């Protein structure tokens, strides 16, 4: 691999050397040594055909994780951190990057004993607060509204949680200065969508990549709380509920990024022990919100009040 064909980046606390450019990542101009992650191009079609995967898109063979995204690429993630990409004809690097920074990175983190949660993490009062939830719950929009108030983003989409070796308490590792927002969120927050990269389209709406360089923090931050944002039926107002005992464990499994990786990688026991420790050291909440008739500023106030930075709407 010719040196001129690769670039070196930082994300999730790791050095990434890649043949595929990542304009959203922070670059590392001076680097010597072996990278934590290496992204290379290769032809995986013959291997995928030999695997003979029936009615599925995933396989785990000889400590290598394979997955096939039709019309995008076949990916292989090795336990040593090498990711091989076999692009489909005509696939853009934009689409390749979505799965490299998503599913591939999720496997890399799990292999390194780092828990990937699905959501956004924002720094409030010097502590990290993770916002998790199902697709469409509004977690990225809530995080963006907090950024609009002057708070800083640690990560969006994949939240990397590790344990501080000095005190065995959880910290969030920063990813890169970008949010992914649906166009209705961009409009509701009165952001300028002109010039934003369209990540993908679903039906008649688009999801944009929103750079947040001025609202991003690049240090590991202690994790103080996890908030599950849940849409609920009815007209009842928002309600914040603290979860105790064993209640957080199914929540943490549900919102582990691509949790179907866990059994495939043989990590059920590890995940149970890790999330048990996490639930013992972190405040975990469920924030029920009505599906309509609520402004994001009300949710922002609830989060800030719980974090000890009480404000009015």
Image (cartoon, rainbow, N blue to C red):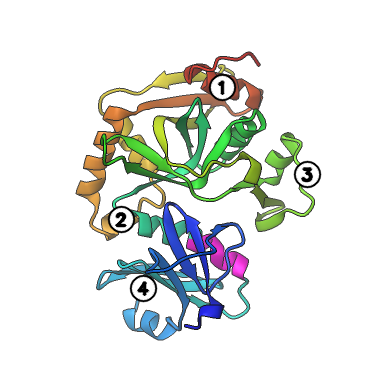
Label 4 residue SS: loop
Residue 246 falls in image quadrant: top left
Relative depth, front residue between 151 and 179: 151
Label 3 residue SS: loop
Discs 1/3, front: 3
Q: Which residue is mark 2?
A: 112
Q: CA distance from mark 3 to mark 2?
A: 38 Å
Q: CA distance from mark 2 to mark 1?
A: 42 Å
Q: Which mark is residue 54?
A: 4
Label 2 residue SS: loop
Q: CA distance from mark 1 to mark 3?
A: 33 Å
Of the two numbered discs 1 and 3 on the same chain, state the one appearing first in sequence: 3
Q: Which residue is mark 1?
A: 234
- Residue 212 at least partly seen: no
Q: Residue drawn 56% across and 57% down? A: 25
The answer to whether the residues at label 3 and label 2 have Cβ atoms under 8 Å apart is: no
Residues rendered magenta in the picture: 93-100
Q: Residue drawn 42% across and 20% down? A: 241
Check disc 2: other Cα within 10 Å, few if <14, some if 14-19, many if 20+.
Answer: few
Of the two numbered discs 3 and 2 on the same chain, state the one appearing first in sequence: 2
- Residue 280: image location, x then y, percent: 27, 28
- Residue 128: image location, x then y, percent: 45, 33
Of the two numbered discs 3 and 4 on the same chain, state the one appearing first in sequence: 4
């Amino acid at each position: 691999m010719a040196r001129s064909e690769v670039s070196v980046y930082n994300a999730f606390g790791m050095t990434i050397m890649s043949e595929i450019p990542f304009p959203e990542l922070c670059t590392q101009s001076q680097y010597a040594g072996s990278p934590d992650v290496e992204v290379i191009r290769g032809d995986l079609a013959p291997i995928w055909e030999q695997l003979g995967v029936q009615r599925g898109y995933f396989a785990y063979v000889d400590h290598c994780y394979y997955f096939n995204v039709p019309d995008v690429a076949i990916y292989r993630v090795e336990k040593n951190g090498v990711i091989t990409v076999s692009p489909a004809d005509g696939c853009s690097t934009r689409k390749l990057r979505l799965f490299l920074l998503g599913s591939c990175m999720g496997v890399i983190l799990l292999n390194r004993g780092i828990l990937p949660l699905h959501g956004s993490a924002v720094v409030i009062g010097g502590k990290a607060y993770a916002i998790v939830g199902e697709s469409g719950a509004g977690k990225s929009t809530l995080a963006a509204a907090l950024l609009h108030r002057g708070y800083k983003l640690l990560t969006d989409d994949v939240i990397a949680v590790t344990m501080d070796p000095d005190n065995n308490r959880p910290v969030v590792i920063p990813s890169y200065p970008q949010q992914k927002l649906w166009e209705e969120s961009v409009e509701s927050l009165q952001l300028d969508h002109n010039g934003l990269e369209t990540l993908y389209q679903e039906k008649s709406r688009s999801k944009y990549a929103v750079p947040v360089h001025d609202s991003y923090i690049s240090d590991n931050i202690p994790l103080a709380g996890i908030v599950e944002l849940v849409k609920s039926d009815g007209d009842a107002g928002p309600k914040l509920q603290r979860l105790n005992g064993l209640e957080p464990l199914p929540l943490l499994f549900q919102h582990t990024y691509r949790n179907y990786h866990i059994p495939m990688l043989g990590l059920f026991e590890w995940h149970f022990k890790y999330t048990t420790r996490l639930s013992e050291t972190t405040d975990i909440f469920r924030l029920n919100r009505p599906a309509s008739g609520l402004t994001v500023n009300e949710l922002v106030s609830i989060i800030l009040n719980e974090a000890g930075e009480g404000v009015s709407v």
